[in-house]
Amino acid sequence: MGTNPDRYSEIRNHDSADGLHRYDLQDRYLKLVRHSLPAIARLKGWGLKEDHCFMRVILDQLFQDCWYNHLDRRLAAYKQLNNDQLRRAIALGTVIENGDENALARWDRESLLWRRKACIRAAD
């Protein structure tokens, strides 16, 4: 997965989750997507409010594609991520948690675009 180093400029200077144990990384990720982000979204009236929407946006952004093109959809996605991927997913979630609605809106648009392309590929 060749990523553009500027691609993750939004996540610089945010909590990086460095030095955390794998289970702590998983717990932090789940706390973000299941609790913190939906609660913030409801308070601020964001269009995305459900945990699975935040998971979709973050995981798609992580892979720059539909996450299910990279992980087994039958298994919990977060359990399949390596530690570096978990740290990056947490950093992406932290950007949203810190209130960057512009990043969230852009990432949601990109996610939906990648998914439309995936549907087209699947129909070929």
Image (cartoon, helix red, strand yellow):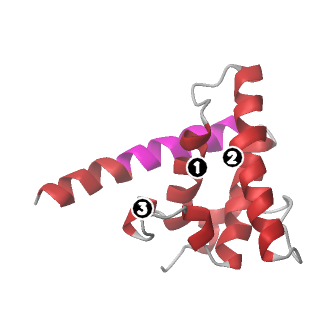
| 61, 81: nearer the viewer | 81
Residue denoted by label 2: 33
Q: Is residue 107 left or right of residue 8?
A: left
The location of residue 68, given as percent across then percent down, is: 41, 62
Residue 65 visible within the image: no
Give yes or no for contact between labels 2 and 1 (Cβ–Cβ under 8 Å): yes
Q: Which residue is label 1 attached to?
A: 55
Q: Is residue 123 magenta?
A: no
Image quadrant assignment for residue 41: top right
- Cα separation between marks 2 and 3: 18 Å
* Mark 2, other Cα within 10 Å: few <14 / some 14–19 / many ≥20: many
Q: Quadrant of the C terminus?
A: bottom left
What separation in Å lies between label 1 and label 3 (alpha carbons)? 13 Å
Above or below, 91 against 51 in this view is: below
Residue type beneath disc 1: Met
Measuring 59% from the left and 53% from the top, which residue is drawn there? 58
From the image, state whether disc 2 or disc 3 is nearer to you. Answer: 3
Query: Could you tell which of marks 1 and 3 lies nearer the N-terminus?
Result: 1
The region drawn magenta spans 100-113
Front in this rendered view, residue 1 or 12:
1
- Label 1–label 3 contact, CB within 8 A: no
Q: Main secondary structure of the magenta part?
A: helix
Labels 2 and 3: the sequence-earlier one? 2
Q: Residue at x 49, y 80 (%)?
A: 2
Identify the disc placed on residue 70: none
Looking at the image, the residue that sits furthest to the front is 74
**Residue 27 percent coordinates (x, y):** 78, 59
Residue 76 vertical position relative to residue 51 in the rendered view, above or below:
below
Q: Could one spot residue 8 in this view of the protein?
A: yes
Name the residue furthest left.
124
Q: Residue at x 60, y 44 (%)?
A: 54
Decide: is 100 above or below 91. above
